[in-house]
Every structure is written in C-alpha cells, then in structure tokens.
Image (spheres, rainbow, N blue to C red):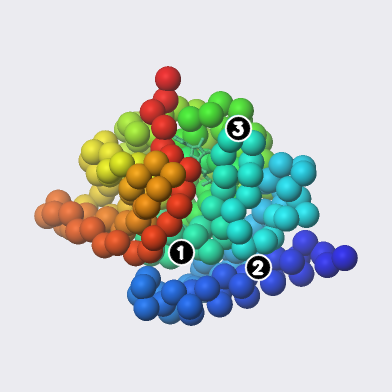
Amino acid sequence: MATHAAKRERMVAQVEAMYAETAAETGLSAMSSAVRAALGKVERHRLVPAQEVSLAYGNYPLSIGAGQTISQPYIVALSTDLIGPHAGQVVLEVGTGSGYQAAILAEIVARVYSIEVVPELGRGAAEGLAGLGYTNVEVRVGDGYAGWSEKAPFDAIVVTAAAPNVPSALIDQLKPGGRMVIPVGERWGAQDLLLVSKHADGRLERKSVLPVRFVPLVHGA
Ligand code: SAH
C-alpha cells in the first residue's frame, strides 16, 4: 500500500500534467512553486470523510456529505494560481466544504476567511483545519452571497460553488487590484470558471478560463 505521502506526490504529478494539457485554455503552463509546495504538503486525507480517506489523493471530485462534492485537486490548484497568491495577502473563500481549498490558501497567504452555509460542514472543516495546525484560517457559518464585510476588503476571493452571476457584495469586498475566481453559469449545467480582476480605478475585467461543473451556490436560510 502506498503511503499518503507517496499518493500525494502522485497527485501533484497528475495535477502538473493537467496544467500542461490545459495551458492553451488557462494561460498557465505550469503550477507555481508555491501551489506545488502546498499541494505536496496539505494532508487532504485528514479533511475528507472517513469513507473517502483511501480516495483522498485521486485527481477527481469527492463526496463530503450533506449532498456536497469537493473539487478535484487540479481545480483547487488552478483556482489558487489564478488569484496569483502571495505572502501577506488576506483571502476570502466562499464554500468551505472540507476545508481543503482553505488549507492550500493558508499555506501561501497570511490569512484566510472562509464561509460555509451548511453548519455541520463548517464546523467539521474548522475542526479539521485546527487539527492540521492552521491558526490563520477562520471559518464562519453563513451565506457567502453577502461576503464577510467585517473582514473586507480582500486581496482575493475564491468562490467554490457556482452562481448565476458574480454576487455584487463580493465585487464590493474585493480590493482595487484584487482578483476573484468564481464558477458562473447554470445550476448543474454549463458553467465557466471566471477570473474577475478589479483594476485600480475600480473597472472590472472578466476572463473565462475553463468550462467547469461545481455544486450550486445556494442562498442561505
Ligand atoms: N472549497 C471546498 C469545496 C466546496 S464545495 C473544499 O475545498 O472542500 C461547495 C461548498 O459551498 C459546499 O460545502 C456548499 O455547502 C457551500 N455553499 C453553497 N452555497 C453557499 C453559500 N451561499 N455560502 C457559503 N457556502 C455555500
């Protein structure tokens, strides 16, 4: 049986290969060294449900309960690279899920705020992240459509559930010069991973990066 570390290395190699295959579409020919290091380090098997541990390092989506699915590691890596993360930044994630994307971000940036609408997922992710030793991630249960105004503005925002359009509160909470990655499109249908850049003068630029399929961003109760 391969160790978790060996499986993780294989996963990193698979993600790297997918970057090469999709370079023409994404404009990113290789994973950044920061994202590669984070992917090689974060113990994904400690964030997924017990019955998924043996599948934790497959480069495919996984079920995490509450009817929710987490993205394949390639999409997590790509979303992270698209925001151009670096030390010192404060990043908002919408859709904490398992906490894996938050952990990848927390390896690179200064502080991560993450919002999850399903209470048991939010609590589970907060516990999992604390168990892995992350002290720079704060998880809140709530509706991510509204963002997290008390902690705004953010250098970057990563949305990990699909919305029909880019929520205006999230645009407001993005710093000038900031970037947001968000899947936009139909519920369970055709969606595009969008990179939204907010220029210094407030002007927005949208680039469609890749066709994707994410679970929907729901409106909280
Ligand atoms: N980023 C996660 C995967 C997220 S799956 C990870 O790395 O594991 C999408 C998540 O978004 C689900 O957990 C879902 O419950 C959550 N979600 C859906 N609508 C939301 C909303 N309005 N606000 C916050 N979270 C939401």
* Residue 199 relative to residue 44: left or right: left
Residue lying at the far front of the rendered structure: 189
The one of 172 and 133 positioned closer to us in this rendering: 172
Q: Residue at x 63, y 75 (%)?
A: 13
At numbered mark 1, what does the secondary structure look like: helix, strand or loop? helix
Among the two numbered marks 3 and 1 on one chain, the one whose residue lies closer to the N terminus: 3
Label 2: few (<14), some (14–19) or many (≥20) C-alpha neighbours in 10 Å: many
* Image quarter in which the C terminus is found: top left
Q: Residue at x 33, y 53 (%)?
A: 180
Q: Is mark 3 within 8 Å of ligand 1?
A: yes
Q: Which residue is mark 1?
A: 78
Q: Is residue 46 above or below residue 29?
A: above
* Residue 180 relative to residue 78: left or right: left
- The span from disc 1 to disc 2 (Cα, nearest Å) is 14 Å
Among the two numbered marks 1 and 2 on one chain, the one whose residue lies closer to the N terminus: 2
Among the two numbered marks 2 and 3 on one chain, the one whose residue lies closer to the N terminus: 2
- The span from disc 3 to disc 1 (Cα, nearest Å) is 25 Å
* Residue 74 relative to residue 165: left or right: right
At numbered mark 2, what does the secondary structure look like: helix, strand or loop? helix
Q: Is mark 2 within 8 Å of ligand 1?
A: no
Residue 24 coordinates in the image, percent (x, y): 37, 78
Q: Amino acid at mark 1?
A: Leu
Viewer can see residue 85 = no
Q: Amino acid at mark 2?
A: Met
Q: Are marks 1 and 2 in contact (CB under 8 Å)?
A: no
Q: Are marks 2 and 3 in contact (CB under 8 Å)?
A: no
Q: Quadrant of residue 28?
A: bottom left
- The span from disc 2 to disc 3 (Cα, nearest Å) is 26 Å
Q: Which residue is mark 2?
A: 11
Q: Is mark 1 within 8 Å of ligand 1?
A: no
Viewer can see residue 3 = yes
